[in-house]
Image (cartoon, coloured by chain):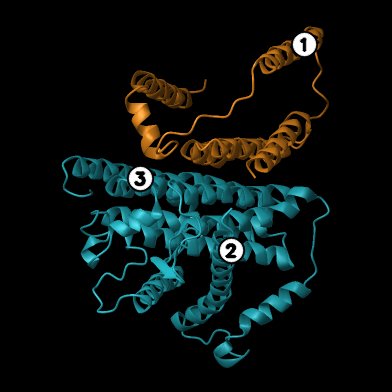
Chain colours: A orange, B cyan
Amino acid sequence: MERVAFALIAALIVVSGIVVVRHRNPVVAAVALAFNLVGVAGVYMLLRAQFVGLLQVVVYAGAIMVLILFVIMLLNLIEEAEPHPAGTFQRWLAPLAAVAFAVTVGSGLWRSTPAAFGAAPEGFGTASSVGRELFTRFYYPFEAISLLLIVAMIGAVLLSKRRLP
Amino acid sequence: MDWIGVLISAVKIVVVFSALMGAVSLMTWVERRLSGVIQFRWGPNRVGPWGLLQPIADGVKFIQKEDIIPTDAYVPLYLAAPMLAFVPAAFAFTVIPFGPDVVLFGRTVKLVILDMDGGVLWGFAATALGVYALVLAGWSSRSKFSLMGGLRSSAQMLSYELPLVLSIVAVVLVSGTLRPTEIVARQAGSIWNWNVFGGGAQLLGFILFTIAGYAETNRLPFDLPEAEGELVAGYHTEYSGMRFATFFMAEYINMMTSSALAITLFLGGWQLGFPVPWTGWPLWILQILAFVAKLAFFQFLYVWVRWTLPRFRYDQLMNLGWKGLLPLSLGNLAVTAVLVAYGVVGK
């Protein structure tokens, strides 16, 4: 059952990922990215991390992607006029990077022995357990991120308030 | 695998979905009749007794209408948009508990389709995905009016999601859980225990949630995405027949879900709020009826507000959202946090 669900979700993620990269129409690409993000939320759900999965849908698919779509529509981008020209630099680097990545992941997979996950601890993936981890073990990184977000927010306000010449 | 459990879930889904669709078609009639009462005219009263068969006549009419696809429309997204409106709306309703745990033939059946730990978030995630339908319908129609409607709706929903979520967070703080069934269980006993009153001291939160809920469902006085006077019909200007009807149904289901969430979070869900001498099946039937009665009251409120308040102007809408509701809901959250920290309300 879980395997079937994973296969479906994985197919959704891969296909929507390809559409994001390949499709000429930016709105379609944005919608495919939304499907992709919902698919990743599905993977979280399969891993019993339901709180993270739900947040993924609320934050990424529900808020950030809508903003991106909003901007695309405001700019009225209908279609990419012509395929993006691949520079000579890119033309050589891209396949090399792809092969290097595939080799790294593949060798890792090859060497490891398949093993089942250990039993999840009581209350794994619920909001309360995630919250406890955030405010105990990951307290300092968590606070650092909140500081970073505030800086970014103030920056955005400053940039938008700057008078244009 | 527990086949009987699967069967029970399937039955629950079918029953709840049919009840929801029945309520939607009834609501299309109720809205027009009530509008008639408020405006001192009749409303549809010809088809069947009191015009009750009007929704069926409407359905037949919608099916017969020509399905128009504009020449310039971006067809795949144009066809997908009504479905994207309908599915999340129906999804969100799955986490709403509509009755207590019931013992049937020696099995305990929970009267909620999906009883999950992050249920409140689930309901919220589903409604957040509903924005796509409006945006995509507006964009893919390739019409000025539709595009303006789609843009307005996305701006409006993003702005009003914030006060909506912040007022939900205050309830979650008070309840100490994201599970809707537990939030409802905490509000047992007298009416005073409901979150809107002494149970959570969330009267302000309830008012903010209701106002933001009206904006999220695009109902008057916040129906700018489809303001007839300016935008013909907003994002669904180009839609006809059953595709238009799907948008229409999605709007009504969204109204139901939004009110059901308000009931669950603030008004004690299916709790009666007063003691009754019965136990067993008379009690839980009464409790389901209490849920239905609360839902019906909210639907009445929607129509009442529609003919009482005029539509906002766009800048007024944004001012109200960002300068009125958002600071108020932030303040409400801060006050609630202090109250919970000092043990005045909550567990």
**Residue under label 1:** A90
What residue appears at the point 42 percent right and 44 percent down from the top-left corner? B162
Q: Secondary structure at mark 2?
A: helix
> Quick one: SS at disc 1?
helix
Q: Which residue corresponds to mark 2?
A: B7
Disc 3 versus disc 2: nearer the observer = 2
Query: How many residues crowd mark 2 within 10 Å: few (<14), some (14–19), many (20+)?
Result: few
Q: How many marks?
A: 3
Residue contact between numbered discs 1 and 2, judged by CB atoms under 8 Å: no
Disc 1 to disc 3, how far (Cα)? 47 Å
Residue A29 visible: no
3D distance between C-alphas at marks 1 and 2 = 56 Å
Per the image, the residue denoted by label 3 is B169
The amino acid type of the residue labelled 3 equals Val
- Badge nearest the viewer, 1 or 3: 3
Q: Which picture quadrant has residue B55?
A: bottom right
Rate crowding at label 3 as few (under 14), some (14 to 19) or many (20 or more) other CA atoms within 10 Å. Answer: many
Amino acid residing under circle 2: Leu
Q: Residues within 10 Å of mark 1 (few under 14, many from 20)?
A: few
Locate residue B7: give its quadrant.
Answer: bottom right
